[in-house]
Amino acid sequence: MKKITSLIGLIALLIFAGCQTEPLSSESGLTSADAKFQKSNLRFDWSCTTTASTVDLYAGQHILVGNVTVKEDGSDYKITYNITNSGYCLKATHLSVENSPNGFPITNSGNPKVGHFEYSEAHDCLSSYTYTVPMDEGDYIAAHAVVTCTTGGVETLYATLPATANFCITTGRKIDGAKSYIKVDVTDGPLSGSYWGWCADESLGFDNVGVPQGDSLCFNDNSFTVYTLNDESHISSIIANVDHIDSALWLINNLDALLGEGYLYGNIQWALWKLLNNQECNSCNYNLKLPSGDITIAGMEVYNKAITQGDGFVPACGDQTIAILDNGVSQPIIIPIAIPCDNGDCEETAWADGCDFPGNQWATYFHYGTEN
């Protein structure tokens, strides 16, 4: 009788062991990653279907600091972190793009391992940063950032600017490696320094108002007032299309990127004239140092980029705003000025809003798609 009982027990043990060794991933078509979470009662919430091309970026779970946008560019995504809250800036970004949420690097407890994300970069207090990601990597996106609060800003900058400025200008065509239509050298005061500047109004010039000094034309009588974008009534007398100032600011802040794409500073000046005053200088090849036939086609390309990508752009600390030098008679001159960034003593983690990871943190991800 004992032998029969032992035999029955051995058979039961073998059946139990066979059941235990069957892989969980074979049940209901689950992947191995799904199975791992099932063991600890952790699963992705497949009922969450946040699908968008633009999502909010939250710091500390409840502070709206900006957004993350996804745009298609050929076979790539352009995934951009935008800080729109002037009290914060980017200190680091981490990005993961996968075909399924199961592909995100995560811990056994279901929290994302941002240090293992495929794309990461440290930043010196930026308001915007773009990653180029092949589209075949997937369409599930986890966008993490570290942001810090700032005590600088555009108002701090404006408070330091002088009432007037003396300066010299040299046209870009006389400078090797020029980055703009005119180089502006402010000779004294808080604005003292060199700037890659632009002309605001194609119809005006500098004839008989400056003092020639070699290749430069100098203005030394304090006749040019320094205006900021806060001086709305005067700015509107210089710029007809004030609604396009955001696009013009985007253009100036993306100067190096546009030059890197093969555009010339003359294309950018042409686009600025069209943006600000709807002027098309189609006989300015010599002045803008442009090849024949290039002036309208490439200029319109830059203009369209600024209209589509610069809509709503607001420079934050670390970006450039503008000051305009104007005497009411001559060409108003635009100069870019960096907005100071004085980091505060706070630092927050931030996530692009969407669906929750299965862990106990508030990390989120989203699915890229066009909103309905």
Image (tube, rainbow, N blue to C red):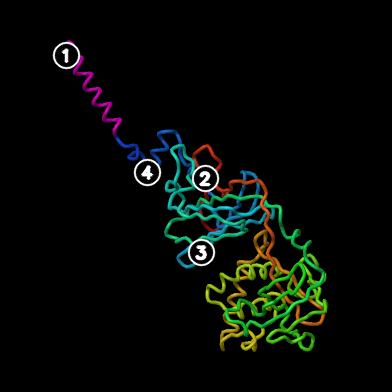
Q: Which mark is residue 48?
A: 2
- Classify 10 Å Cα crowding around label 3: few (below 14), some (14-19), many (20 and above): some
| Amino acid identity at mark 3 | Glu
| Amino acid identity at mark 4 | Thr
| Alpha carbon distance from label 1 to label 3 | 72 Å
Residue 340 appears at what percent x and percent y?
69, 59
Q: Is residue 9 left or right of residue 165?
A: left
Q: Which mark is residue 3?
A: 1
Residue named by callout 3: 72
Q: Which residues are magenta?
A: 1-21
| Alpha carbon distance from label 3 to label 4 | 29 Å
- Classify 10 Å Cα crowding around label 1: few (below 14), some (14-19), many (20 and above): few
| Alpha carbon distance from label 2 to label 4 | 19 Å
Q: Are marks 3 and 4 in contact (CB under 8 Å)?
A: no
- Who comes first in sequence, dot 4 or dot 1? 1
Question: Split into 4 quadrants, where in the image is the N terminus?
Answer: top left
Residue 191 appears at what percent x and percent y?
74, 69
Does residue 257 show up? yes
